[in-house]
Image (tube, grey):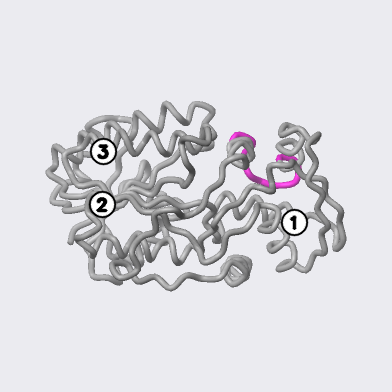
Amino acid sequence: MRVLVTGATGFIGGRLLPALRAAGHDCVVLTRNAERYDGPDGVDVVEGDLLEPGSFDAALENCTAAYYLVHSMESPDFEARDRRAARNFARAASAADVSRVIYLGGLGETSEGLSPHLQSRRSLEGVLRDGDYDLTVLRAAVVLGAGGASFELLRQFVERLPQFAVLPLPAAVTTTCQPIAIDDAVASLAGVLDAPETRGETYDIGGPEVLTYEELLLRVARATGRTVLTVPVSWLPRSTATYCLDRLTGIPTVMIASLIEGLDNTVVVRDPCPRDLVPVERTPVTVAIRRALAE
């Protein structure tokens, strides 16, 4: 099957391509700068920009399926940019007679008042559904892997702590989440492509454990050899947490703020992807953390 992967230079897309190639698919990559693209061998590279209609039509030629893995969290106006890019893609994919599109969105219930970042991911589902193809949506929370924004934020933060530390944290760190290992997320994305029954469906994907953000931070700290005592407090402003993380990590400020805002939202699996259709063995959180740290 000939498959287009957008966002192929990103955290998820860069790992998905080898999995698709291993499954025997013919892959096309869309990138804004073909000369700087350094991906796996055996893929066709097409230059284009989803924000520029007509610039990327060639990438969709003869493609049966396409992955939409584009998000622009680093831009202050990311919501508007994301909608425009998704709208352009949906129109072009429909015109090219693409049969199905697979999109990776975010977990979280709209009734709980999603953060701007999660709301943007959810709104993109609506934009992509307007296309004339079958849309499969996978929703994930924190993806544990080297290079992922959420994991890198945790890793860089704890690695700058002393061997023993007492940390006041925003009370929202007691919110629950269901992290997933990067390998499991990639296996799920690749697996639904070869499962026709998943056409037009929406599934939640996550690891085998539900834990709080506080517990996740402590797991990462322990894996790096730190002893950390945490104290969730209601008086700690989000702006203070954002400032501290900005000073201690290399993650862009806009991205940090978006992730901090998302702490209020419970992100756990409610509608899992059927394992008989996509048999993915779920990796324990601690194992996923150790693998990510080893990369």
Badge 2 local density, few (<14 within 10 Å), some, or many (20+)? many
Q: Where 95 falls versus 84 (above or below)? A: below
Which marked residue is nearer to the observer: mark 2 or mark 1? 1
Residue 4 numbered mark, or none: 2
Give residue 196's position: percent from left, percent from top. Answer: 19, 61
The quarter holding residue 293 reads: bottom right
| Image mark count | 3
Give residue 195's position: percent from left, percent from top. Answer: 23, 64
Badge 3 local density, few (<14 within 10 Å), some, or many (20+)? some
Q: Amino acid at mark 3?
A: Arg
Q: Amino acid at mark 2?
A: Leu
* Lower sequence index among marks 3 and 1: 3
Give residue 142's position: percent from left, percent from top. Answer: 54, 53
Work out which quarter of the rendered image holds the C terminus and state it: bottom right
Q: Amino acid at mark 1?
A: Val
Residue under circle 1? 158
Taking the image as shown, residue 286 lies to the left or right of residue 239, namely left
Which marked residue is nearer to the observer: mark 3 or mark 1? 3
Secondary structure category for the residue under label 1:
helix
Magenta-colored span: 246-254
Give residue 46's position: percent from left, percent from top. Answer: 27, 47
Rounded to the nearest whole Å, what is the CA distance between mark 3 and mark 1? 40 Å
